[in-house]
């Protein structure tokens, strides 16, 4: 879908000073209304939040250009977004070819932004930078105010970018400069919701503040006057503080006091990395290109990883910490327990892969690789104490890996001796064609029994989970291999895990986690997603993992012997069905709340949750899994403080967790 972005002709702008001349006129906005997904990915909550990023990005560019010290982002009552900066103000003069204000052009002509012409700003890429006009096209209304040369300019757009009045001066204010954009996302486009999630916006704005050191973003949620929330996001330390923040949130203990920070400029490109090790065994490497999270890595991330492995091996050899006859440290060894941010800024980013999550630009790799090779070697020489700690940590990882390999081989030999290595608890399906088959991972034996009775034996297999919840956080791969809860899952899937993972051996096309809508169910789901995220990540990126959605309520109306009923998957649905039944004015209404899967009989479970014709399932994406991983770290880690914070924040959902 997004490949079509390339079909949009580029604006060729003269390479002169950035002014009205540089913005050229392109096609109108009708196409954006017709195919919003092409421009913002989706019209669900993700696309909705994307509108905000799109506008904020413009203000951040102005800040990076050095002309703006403060960006305000407000969520106003009615889920109106207001973004303002104190930059130079968008050019308002008459555009030479369009014959209207240049600012109007920016908001009404697709791709009309100086950024796309090669002059003006140097940084743009991906879905980002599709521009203000796309936001306008998808808004019920949008108001633009520009403060410039002592004047206040204003223009209002309605219904996806139409306007009755041109940009005009509505007042004067001496000395003030800047741009303010206010908009309401169009509910006719964002049919699912136009309500913003404060935490989602906060996370992304904070990330942008880390990636652009010194840029000040003041974010406020003013929707509910009784509960105003506000944060000032400004980090002089940039991505160094990003690394510290991740450690704080996850409750990790750092290996040393100092975050390693390296940066380099070459031609039009800049690269920076920040990293630090901690007491966990998890690798958390996040890479960005032009401030966009590259979830699938790419050339810049590869450059970082290669150089890191190479430099640590060389240092270890040089100081005889790694002995002559000892194996080299692998990439996994050196990255065990690392938190790293890799950020590059390039003139033209090429994003590749199905979800455009991977940086393609080949020049980014040597840039990062050479930087880390040179500067990390220097850093280690300058910091012998830290260097020793790092080397010890990685050598421990190497030892653990070798021990894990032995344990694995023993486990394999053992399982080879069992006649069939499929777990005893598994009720398999007949079909062997993975295009058809589904594995339901079910919490508890009783729900497992119901699922077994409900399923289609042809293509649905059932695996009830049992045994004590394992603390994977503290366990390494070797212990995962002997865990009674996880090993049956591994055996049933057939893919093996970690470096042995082989998706071609996968025995089912869909893996469905089916757990109760309560605290235990939440726990199990978090555990499973974290496990997949850490040891079978490709299952998630390949789209094989799903979460079943059992109904929360049955709303029934009984009249004499006749019962009519509907299943509700949320409280809103419950209330809606109740109102519908009430409106019919006859019979008694009864609402049953399902506390667990076990309360449904097999037919009900089939109809509501397992029948492909009628069920709803959520496909798990990499962000969901990463989130589970973070939650898991918080819930299972040693630190009490982040756990308390988490529980306070999520009190509604995770009430009775006993720690
Ligand atoms: C362009 O070059 C001349 C001086 O102004 C430059 C400019 O466009 N600056 C600018 C744009 N500052 N802020 C914006 C901006 C801010 C928001 C909130 C939204 C948009 C679309 C642009």
Image: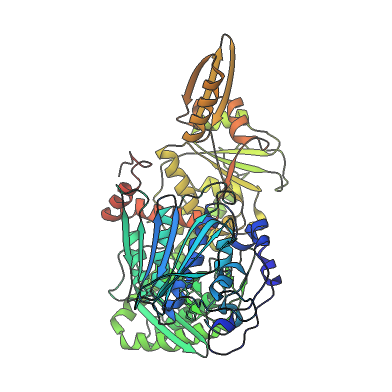
- Picture coordinates of residue 30 (x, y %)? 67, 60
| Residue nearer the viewer, 92 or 488 | 92
Quarter of the figure that contains the C terminus? top left
Residue 468's image quarter? Answer: top left
Which quadrant would the N terminus be assigned to in this image?
bottom right
Q: Residue 72: give x, y in percent of width and height.
A: 37, 66
Q: Residue at x 49, y 59 (%)?
A: 183
Q: In front: 449, or 239?
A: 239
> Which residue is found at the position 73% from the left and 46% from the top?
433
Q: Coloured how?
A: rainbow
The residue under the point 48% across, 23% down is: 591
Give the image location of residue 337, x and y in percent: 39, 67
Is residue 328 at all visible to an observer of this figure? no
Is residue 303 shown left or right of residue 520?
A: right
Q: Is residue 656 above or below residue 567?
A: below
Q: Nearer the viewer, residue 255 or 122?
A: 122
Q: Is residue 606 visible?
A: yes
Q: In the rendering, at what x and y percent does residue 100 appear? A: 59, 74
């Amino acid at each position: 879908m997004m490949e079509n972005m390339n079909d949009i002709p580029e604006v060729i702008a003269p390479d002169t000073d950035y002014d009205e001349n540089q913005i050229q006129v392109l096609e109108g906005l009708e196409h954006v209304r017709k195919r919003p997904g092409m421009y913002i990915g989706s019209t669900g909550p993700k696309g909705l939040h994307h509108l905000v990023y799109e506008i904020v990005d413009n203000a951040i560019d102005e800040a990076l250009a050095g002309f703006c010290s403060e960006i305000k982002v407000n969520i106003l009552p009615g889920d109106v977004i207001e973004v303002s900066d104190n930059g130079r103000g968008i050019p308002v003069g008459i555009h030479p070819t369009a014959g209207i204000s240049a600012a109007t052009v920016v908001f009404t002509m697709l791709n009309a932004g100086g950024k796309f012409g090669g002059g003006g700003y140097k940084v743009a890429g991906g879905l980002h930078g599709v521009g203000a006009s796309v936001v306008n096209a998808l808004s019920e209304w949008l108001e633009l105010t520009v403060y410039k040369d002592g004047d206040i300019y204003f223009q209002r757009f309605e219904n996806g970018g139409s306007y009755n009045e041109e940009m005009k001066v509505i007042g004067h204010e001496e000395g003030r400069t800047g741009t303010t954009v206010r908009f309401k996302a169009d509910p006719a486009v964002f049919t699912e919701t136009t309500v913003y999630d404060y935490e989602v916006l906060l996370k992304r704005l904070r990330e942008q503040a880390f990636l652009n050191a010194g840029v000040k973003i003041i974010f406020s949620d003013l929707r509910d006057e009784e509960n105003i929330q506000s944060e000032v996001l400004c980090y002089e330390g940039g991505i160094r503080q990003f690394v510290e923040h991740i450690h704080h949130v996850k409750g990790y203990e750092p290996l040393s006091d100092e975050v390693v920070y390296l940066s380099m400029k070459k031609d039009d490109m800049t690269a920076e990395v920040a990293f630090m090790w901690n007491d966990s065994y998890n690798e958390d490497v996040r890479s960005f290109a032009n401030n966009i999270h590259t979830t699938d890595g790419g050339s810049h991330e590869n450059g970082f990883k290669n150089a890191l492995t190479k430099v640590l091996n060389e240092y270890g050899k040089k100081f005889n910490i790694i002995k002559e006859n000892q194996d080299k440290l692998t990439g996994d060894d050196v990255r065990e327990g690392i938190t790293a941010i890799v950020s590059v800024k390039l003139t033209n980013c090429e994003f590749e892969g199905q979800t455009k999550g991977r940086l393609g630009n080949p020049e980014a790799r040597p840039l990062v690789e050479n930087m880390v090779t040179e500067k990390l070697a220097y850093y280690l020489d300058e910091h012998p104490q830290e260097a020793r700690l790092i080397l010890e940590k990685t050598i421990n990882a190497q030892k653990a890996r070798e021990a894990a390999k032995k344990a694995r081989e023993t486990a394999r030999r053992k399982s080879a001796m069992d006649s069939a290595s499929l777990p005893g608890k598994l009720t398999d399906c007949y079909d062997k064609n993975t295009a058809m088959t589904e594995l339901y991972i079910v919490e508890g034996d009783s729900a497992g029994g119901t699922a077994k009775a409900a399923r289609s034996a042809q293509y649905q297999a059932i695996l009830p989970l049992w045994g004590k919840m394992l603390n994977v956080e503290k366990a390494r791969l070797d212990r995962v291999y002997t865990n009674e809860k996880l090993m049956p899952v591994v055996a049933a899937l057939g893919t093996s895990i970690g470096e042995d993972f082989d998706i071609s051996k996968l025995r089912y096309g869909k893996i469905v986690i089916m757990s109760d809508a309560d605290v235990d169910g939440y726990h199990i789901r978090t555990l499973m997603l974290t496990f997949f995220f850490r040891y079978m990540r490709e299952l998630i990126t390949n789209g094989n993992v799903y979460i079943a959605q059992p109904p929360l309520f049955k709303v029934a109306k009984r009249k004499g012997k006749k019962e009519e009923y509907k299943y509700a998957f949320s409280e809103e649905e419950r209330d809606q069905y109740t109102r519908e039944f009430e409106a019919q004015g006859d019979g008694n209404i009864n609402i049953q709340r399902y506390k667990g899967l076990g309360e449904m009989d097999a037919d009900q479970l089939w109809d509501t949750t397992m029948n492909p014709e009628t069920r709803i399932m959520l496909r798990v994406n990499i962000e969901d899994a990463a989130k589970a991983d973070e939650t898991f770290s918080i819930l299972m880690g040693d630190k009490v403080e982040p756990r308390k914070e988490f529980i306070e924040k999520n009190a509604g959902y995770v009430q009775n967790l006993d720690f």
